[in-house]
Each structure stands twice: as C-alpha cells, then as structure tokens.
Image (tube, rainbow, N blue to C red):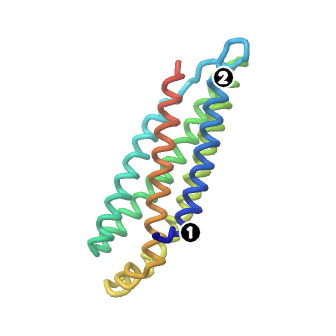
Amino acid sequence: MQRREPFKFMLQLAMFGSGLLFLGLLVFYTILQRPEAGFGQLILPQIFWASTLLMLISSLTLHLAHLYFKQDKYPTFRFYMGFTLSLGICFIVMQLIGWQQLFQLNANAAVRTSRGFIIILSGLHILHIFAGLIFLIKVFIELLRRRSYVETFVYSVNPPNQLKINLIIFYWHFVDVLWLILFMFLCWHHR
C-alpha cells in the first residue's frame, strides 16, 4: 500500500471543503431565485469575460512552467512562473474593476441582491487566488535568489521543493476550474 502524501491530502481536503462552500452558495442562489424571494437575474460585468480568459491563460502558463521545470530549463521556468503570478494579480484587479461596474448600476432591491451574490462569489474566489499568489510569490522569490544553473538544479531536485511546486500547480488548476464553473453559472443566470 502506497503512503499518501500528507500535505497533498490536506490540500485535497481543503479544496473539497472549498468546493462544498461554493456548491452551497450556488444551490442557495438557485433555490432563492424566485421573484418573491427578491433575487433578480444576475448582471454580469463585461470585464469578467476578460478576467476569465486571463485565468485560463494562467493555467496554461503554469503548466508550461512545470514542463520547463521538469526539463531543467530554469530561466524559462522562472519566466512562466513570473508570468503566471502577473496574470493572477491582473485577475484580481479585473475582478475589482467588475465590482466597481456593479456598484455603478442603478440599483433596485433585486439588483442589489444579485450584485451582492456576485460579489460574495467573486470575493471568496479572490481569497482563494490570493492564497495561491502568496505561495507563487514565495517560490518565485526563491527562484530569483538562485540564478545560477547549479543553485537552481539543487533547488529543483530537492523533494520538498518538488512537492511545493506540484502542490502549487495542483491548487492553481483547482482555482482556475473553480472560477470556470462559477463563471458558467453566472453566465447561465445572466440577463
């Protein structure tokens, strides 16, 4: 019987819990989306489309970073890690701009309720992205400190560092898929 990696298992449990939280919010909205409940159709900011594209691209750039990491092409690995980090920050900024667009709407009670729901979903997702960014920044700084091939190679063959990078990639893909599901839900209920 193969031993389960405890950090990966804890991350999977946390991701499962996050998935349940978002599922509960989506079910809550679906149940309460009756006219008498005061929930109107969702008004989706246009910038959310662009931020979703950024999220998908960030998943691709992190995948490319991982490929170059496994091929010992460390400068390219560093570049794609930095690019992914930049895309994650841009995603958060675009979400906040989307919030600003939502607050500029003339708001009756139904619009305020649906706006609040979008902000809750988006805000919780931003917290998840922010957590991923903290670890991406930590790894990126570690990589910048190891500029020579030998230092980076020693870093890359260290099992705890390999695990850290694999967990970050696993988590980042999770938050990307999570946003894609949330965005499709928002589009489905968009007016």
- Category of crowding for the residue at label 1, using alpha-carbon neighbours closer than 10 angstroms: few (below 14), some (14–19), many (at least 20): few
Looking at the picture, which amino acid does disc 1 mark?
A: Pro
The numbered disc on residue 50 is none
CB contact under 8 Å: marks 1 and 2: no
How many marks the image carries: the answer is 2
Is residue 50 shown above or below 146?
above
Name the quadrant containing residue 12.
bottom right
Give the mark toward the camera: 1 or 2: 1
Which residue sits furthest front? 1
Query: Where residue 50 appears, x then y in whole percent?
Result: 43, 38
- Residue 88 or 16: which is nearer the viewer? 16
Label 2 sits on residue: 31
Percent x, y of residue 40: 64, 18
Other-residue count near label 2 (Cα within 10 Å), few / some / many at <14 / 14–19 / ≥20: few
Between 135 and 107, the one lying in front of the other is: 135
The picture places residue 162, in percent across and down from the top left corner, at 42, 73
CA gap, disc 1 and disc 2: 37 Å
Residue that extends furthest to the top in the rendered view of this protein: 36
Q: Nearer the viewer, residue 102 or 78?
A: 78
Q: Would residue 87 appear left or right of 17 to someone viewing this image? A: left
The image position of residue 101, as x and y in percent, is 58, 31
Q: Earlier in the sequence, mark 1 or mark 2?
A: 1
Residue for point 68% across, 31% down: 116
- Of 19 and 55, nearer the camera is 19
Q: Secondary structure at mark 1?
A: helix
Q: Residue drawn 56% across and 39% down?
A: 97
Rendered image: mark on residue 6: 1
Q: Is residue 166 above or below residue 128?
A: below
Amino acid type shown at disc 2: Ile
Compared to residue 149, the image places residue 43 above or below, namely above
Q: Secondary structure at mark 2?
A: helix
Residue at point 59%, 40% (across, down): 122
